[in-house]
Image: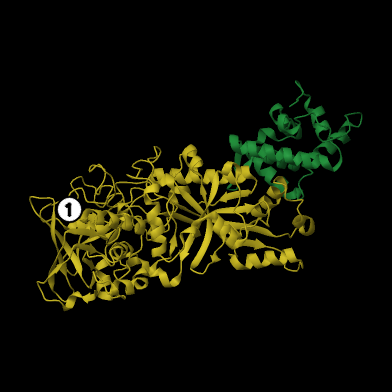
Chain colours: A yellow, B green
Amino acid sequence: MAFVDTRSLANGETIEADICIIGAGPAGIAIATAFEGDSTRIALLESGDIGYDEETQALAAGEVVGIPYPDLDVVRLRMLGGSTNHWGGNIRPMDALDFEVRDWIPNSGWPFGLEELRPYYKRAATFCGVPNEGFEIESQRSAVGADPWVFEDDAITTQVFQTVGGEARALGLYHEEALEQAANITTYLFANVVDIVTDALSNQVRELTVKTLNDKTLKARAKYYVLAAGGIENPRILLLANKTRPAGLGNENDLVGRYFMEHLTSPDFALLFPSDPQLDFRFYKDFEADWGETWGMLTFSEETQRQGGLVNARFQAATITNEFNKNIDNPGMQSLATLVRSGSSGRVPDELERHLANVIADIDDVAESGYYRFFHHPNYPLISIDLVVISEQIPNPESRVYLGEDKDRFGQNRCVLDWRLTDFDSDNLTRISDQIQRQFGRSGLGRVRIQLPEGGYARINPHPHYHHMGTTRMDNDPKRGVVDANCRLHEASNLYVAGSSVFPTVGNVNPTLTIIALAYRLADHLKGLDS
Amino acid sequence: MTVSPKPNRRTLLTALLALPALSGAETAAAAQNSNRLTGLFSNRNSAAILGQAYLQQRPEEADAQTLEALLLSPANLGVLDPQGISLDGAADQRRLKMALQELRRRDFDEGAVLQIGGCMLSVTELRLCALAALT
């Protein structure tokens, strides 16, 4: 129908719909637009405006304890499209093993496998304006005219990621017209949900309490409700729904807000010395496609993960360091120079690196290559590639979001983020390091030098990705999960949760594509209920 | 695969590297022997520096004969000299390198590795480096 400024509605007015969605981020918009052209009336309640609104954004503030993390009103956005407005746009489906119960990872396992999500991933790619086949190796191979690296026994494999193009990256703006033109979808801007009201005697949500910054209070009523406000706000809203359930809605088993997970990244963690300085890594560099960018990433095969008891991790070939005699005039050197200029970090290699590079080139038998025959001398080029590791975090119930003492503009408790890692995460980094070194070495592709801060793995300061996951985890057992396999709250028959807060484990890939795929799956489930 | 049941390491090393049989000029031959083994390093100085780092961790291996013996252990000979091959000329070095790559792969498979300056290297390649440091 259109966009409605909720501030302009009458105090006490009731918004009526068949499905009421809280939050117009990627999940909320995907669910809403899945009903486009349907007779189902959708009310999409968005806290913010189409653009950035400072007063609304201030509602996102909270406290950070535990591992240092940027301010909570910085790491997420309250506006149409949600946090995709500062999104890097990197997407890829999760791996099949990510969904399985892995006996070496506590609390792992989704209620369904990759095959269940596969058709929804295709729709999610379309939603993001990228071709699904862009994730395939063959697609990247033909695009860049280069092959991925081959490791012994395929112990390390290559995945293809895509970056959503600039226009589509702010998903709210990208789908604004669709929202505006859909006859059955009304997007209510400046609509802040401050309570989910449940019947005391039943497990039904009766209505939502909505407030505006110009001090109006409204109600929203629907047959079904979807909470899609993000991995930090979802648990906050459930915990604040404590009028009839003091522990919060869905929190009978003290799970809401627990298992907060982020992707763990350590830049400057690993340095690859290719045995052959001419190692072709075009497959791993950004390729500018019509719709965005594509590039390859390295990851451990399922077999390597199983045998090594590893978490899922990926390695991005980030920057190149080199040192060479620029006076050498040769086509091969020219192309190498071009390659290096495009990604050189400017880091000055140390002496040990030079000696390592010299020796492994000999051992791995590239020293007789044309490159070496022509250019080998004391000042020959040294090439090294930064490998950035991005790994999943082990689900940890002590890593959590909970309500603090501070109140927001509406008198609602702000949230506290207490992000915690365990020794298990450090152990995993050790195992990951060991494996990446081992597999490069045994394949003769090069050697990996691990650069640890003083104090070792325990001192690595994880780089935040603004990926907020796991806080309303999915499990068919109410003692182990907040929502069931259909993302329905165990404690409420007509309330569903969408977004990365339902992820039981997080894999190594950025979460947005999976968020959207799950949203489409939930939309299909809701359509089935209606029919 | 044909491997001598009780190989004399020095003899096998000589055969492997297509060196003259040991004779009265044994000292000169031994020096040449080590040179051939470490000859695959195009930058011997770099190898020697890594080799010194290795020997700091394993000082018990800090003599050339011990290193040669370890490099030509029966387990290694199964890779280095699987068919009792007669090596000669430029092909020697090529085949030696291929065999050493197989040993490197085996080391990584079996965990026969060591960390030098944060880099995981195979024991075989480090022993070759150590030999370069000692000769």
Q: Is residue A243 above or below residue B111?
A: below
Total numbered circles:
1
Label 1 element class: loop
* Residue A244 as seen in the image, left or right of residue B128: left
Which residue is at 45% across, 53% downward?
A: A460
Q: Is residue A455 visible?
A: no
Q: Is residue A63 above or below residue A508?
A: below
Q: Is residue A154 above or below residue A236?
A: above
Q: Nearer the viewer, residue A180 or A531?
A: A531
Looking at the rendered image, the quarter that the C terminus of chain A falls into is bottom left
Circle 1 crowding by C-alpha within 10 Å: few under 14, some 14–19, many from 20: many
- Outermost residue, right direction? B24
Residue A462, position as x, y percentages in the image: 42, 55
- Outermost residue, top direction? B5
Residue A49, position as x, y percentages in the image: 27, 74
Looking at the rendered image, the quarter that the N terminus of chain A falls into is bottom left
* Residue A188 as seen in the image, left or right of residue A521: left
Residue A420, position as x, y percentages in the image: 34, 51
Q: Is residue A338 above or below residue A106?
A: below
Q: Nearer the viewer, residue B98 or B69?
A: B98
Amino acid at dot 1: Leu
- Outermost residue, bottom direction? A8
Label 1 belongs to which residue? A249
What is the chain identity of the residue bearing mark 1?
A: A
* Residue A409 as seen in the image, left or right of residue B90: left
Q: Quadrant of residue A58?
A: bottom left
Which residue is at 74% across, 66% downward?
A: A331
Q: Nearer the viewer, residue A283 or A270?
A: A283
Q: Quadrant of residue B54?
A: top right
Which residue is at 76% across, 66% downward?
A: A330
Residue B73, position as x, y percentages in the image: 71, 28
